[in-house]
Amino acid sequence: MEVPMFSAALTSQILLFAYFLLISYVNLFPFNNLRHTHTDVYYMDRSLGSIFMVLAPFGFIFNIPILMTVGTALLGLYFLGAVLTWWVPYFSK
């Protein structure tokens, strides 16, 4: 694997994970309003999301093909979901 492509893949995955942590742990009212989400379901969702989002970077760092493939697919789906549910409503009427 070429070094620039590897660096770009790993960097984008780490940035997406940092974005997930930011919107999950920091109250950015009115965008995510974490003040009213202190339930067990929310904590479980945040924990499972963190575990699944670490799969791809872990796979790329340790060169585990199945984790690279599954993790990248999950991150792609998460990114698509984040764009559709977070950003499209803000920029469209």
Image (cartoon, helix red, strand yellow):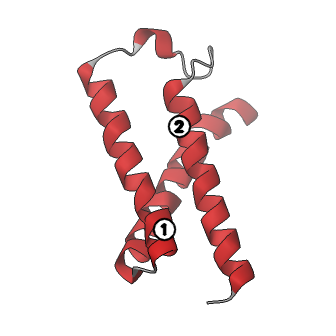
What label sits on residue 11 in the rendered view? none
Identity of the residue drawn at 50% across and 64% down: 57
Report which residue position mark 1 lands on: 72
Which one is nearer the viewer's eye here, 61 or 47? 61
Neighbor class of circle 1 (other Cα within 10 Å; few <14, some 14-19, many 20+) is: many
Which one is nearer the viewer's eye here, 13 or 30? 13
Q: Which residue lies most toward the left here?
A: 40
Residue 9 shown left or right of residue 50 in the figure: right
The Cα–Cα distance between marks 2 and 1, rounded to whole angstroms, is 17 Å
Which of pointers 2 and 1 lies earlier in the amino acid sequence? Answer: 2
Report which residue position mark 2 lands on: 21
Q: How far across and how far down the image is residue 7, in percent?
A: 68, 72
**Mark 2 residue type:** Leu
Identity of the residue drawn at 63% across and 70% down: 9
Neighbor class of circle 2 (other Cα within 10 Å; few <14, some 14-19, many 20+) is: some
Locate the N terminus by quadrant.
bottom right
Residue 2 shown left or right of residue 69 in the figure: right
Q: How far across and how far down the image is residue 82, in percent?
A: 55, 44
Q: Is residue 93 visible?
A: no
Locate the C terminus by quadrant.
top right
Q: Which residue lies most toward the bottom here?
A: 1
Q: How far across and how far down the image is residue 68, in percent?
A: 44, 74
In the rendered view, would you say 87 is above or below 34?
A: below
Identity of the residue drawn at 51% across and 48% down: 81
In the rendered view, would you say 45 is above or below 15?
A: above
Badge 1 marks a residue whose secondary structure is: helix
